[in-house]
Image (cartoon, coloured by chain):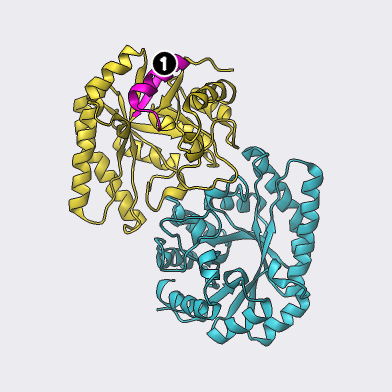
Chain colours: A cyan, B yellow
């Protein structure tokens, strides 16, 4: 049974709620942290959102999400870099110590080339990240997203990137949904910890059957992921930060969000 | 531009056709090999199917598919072994030198336990496989199937299993659909070849977007997989067998199957 001292919630999880509602509800429910999806800012300036979050007594865990580097044309890739640099600034204004990167993929760009473009994108962001004091977390995405969402698909690959950059501002966001299946998971989480690179830990569950590639994630305990086992691995590897609840689900967004948040809290206590 | 000397087709690819129709059409189209899905046998005895295939001038590449080992209860697992042993006999009667294994998964069985059950299942099959002269091919399945279809999800894992068993009757079926995303693919295909374990090579394509987890595969050239690159790796690793077209697609099954087969032949020449 977990207490709530390390519960953080991603604003996308309760997508129907505006940010101001979400942060108040999270705090009332006992959560201590929030990760802010940039889309949830709406018209609110990041600095104003930071004040609201502070006033609610929450800690900002991360800004979600930058990246999406690969594209067929250099002009398009450069535009993405510009957007990412602006997002680093917004993260700093939000008081987010971390910006999560979904590295991107494009079915028109061959894998090897797309992976090179991801490295170039990260390299272009790191100087600005250092200046702003905002760390970057590569989130390896499930291999089912290798065509159009991310060509970084395993912990091994994220670790290799971190080793190659050897930059204190670059690390990894471990999301159980993306990595639970990996036969090397325990070893690669251990390696990530040894490198000092576990920057974030995200939880949800994998449903059987999953009926939509993007928006059919489960609440913790609804699926087959052994979350406590994976959490034990990240903790053994030295991670002591938040467990962030990040769920995309048409089914769960259709519920009364107060009732859903109450279920999140119970599921966090029992299944994380 | 490939000639058709190494074109084989899986009967599931043209699911609407009964086996007797399929094998005649494949031969007429210039294919040289056939892989027989056990479901496509229907009421035809394997030995009778073997005669039909021989008469059409085709080579039987494999029987598809055994495995599906994990289950919560020992009684259920034992029943699966019995079914698999019968399938080895049927493969021998069919004249299939190879039986493809989809190793199985069950969301009620934890990953580590399910992987142990797969090893136990393979161990239980190998003596019968040796006696029957039927080789077994572990087909690593895409990680999106780790919950309910296969807990063997990478080439590295399949290679590790082969190394651990060190049995000449156990090898690997490389299917581009399942492994194309893997950052280690080239290295692990090379390793598989060094072990002498590349027993089969399956082709189709990955569509963007993919709208169904099971039955939305693409015809070669419709998606983002660099099939010629992967084929070059398996050939460099010493494989010189068939490229087997294995496509599950509600969309393509709904087409006139003669027209679809003509497209398969063209796609094989151009995109494999």
Q: Quadrant of the C terminus of chain A?
A: bottom left
Quarter of the image for residue A39 reads: bottom right
- Residue drawn at x 23%, y 31% is B88
- Residue drawn at x 52%, y 78% is A261
**Side (left or right) of B147 relative to B165:** right
Q: Which residue is mark 1?
A: B27
- Residue drawn at x 63%, y 86% is A57
Residue at disc 1, secondary structure: helix
Provide residue B19's location: percent of width, then percent of height.
Answer: 34, 26
- Residue drawn at x 52%, y 22% is B262
Question: Which one is in front, A159 or A40?
Answer: A40
Other residues around mark 1 within 10 Å, as few (<14) / some (14–19) / many (≥20): some
Q: Quadrant of the N terminus of chain A?
A: bottom left
Provide residue A262's location: percent of width, then percent of height.
Answer: 49, 80
- Report if residue A225 is visible in the image: yes
Q: Is residue A153 above or below residue B178?
A: below
Is A30 magenta? The answer is no
Is B28 magenta? The answer is yes
- Report if residue B133 is visible in the image: no
Provide residue A21's location: percent of width, then percent of height.
Answer: 65, 81
Quarter of the image for residue A223 reads: bottom left
Provide residue A78's location: percent of width, then percent of height.
Answer: 80, 49
Q: Which residues are magenta?
A: B16-36
Question: Which one is in front, A186 or B102?
Answer: B102
């Amino acid at each position: 049974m977990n207490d709530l001292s390390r519960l953080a919630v991603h604003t996308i999880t309760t997508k129907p709620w505006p940010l101001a509602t979400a942060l108040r509800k999270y705090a009332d429910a006992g959560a201590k942290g929030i990760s802010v999806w940039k889309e949830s800012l709406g018209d609110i300036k990041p600095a104003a959102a930071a004040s609201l979050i502070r006033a609610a007594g929450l800690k900002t865990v991360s800004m979600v999400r930058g990246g999406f580097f690969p594209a067929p044309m250099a002009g398009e890739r450069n535009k993405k870099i510009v957007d990412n640099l602006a997002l680093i600034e917004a993260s700093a204004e939000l008081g987010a110590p971390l910006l999560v990167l979904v590295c991107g993929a494009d079915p028109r760009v061959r894998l090897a080339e797309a992976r090179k473009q991801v490295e170039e994108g990260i390299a272009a962001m790191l100087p600005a990240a250092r200046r702003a004091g905002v760390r970057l977390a590569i989130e390896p995405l499930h291999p089912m997203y290798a065509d159009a969402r991310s060509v970084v698909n395993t912990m091994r690959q994220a670790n290799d990137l971190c080793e190659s950059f050897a930059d204190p501002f670059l690390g990894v966001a471990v999301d159980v949904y993306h990595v639970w299946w990996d036969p090397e998971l325990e070893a690669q989480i251990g390696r990530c910890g040894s490198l000092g690179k576990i920057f974030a830990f995200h939880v949800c569950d994998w449903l059987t059957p999953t009926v939509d590639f993007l928006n059919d994630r489960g609440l913790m305990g609804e699926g087959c992921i052994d979350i406590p086992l994976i959490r034990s691995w990240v903790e053994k590897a030295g991670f002591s930060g938040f467990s962030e609840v990040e769920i995309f689900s048409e089914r769960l967004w259709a519920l009364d969000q107060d009732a859903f948040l109450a279920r999140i809290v119970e599921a966090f206590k029992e299944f994380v």
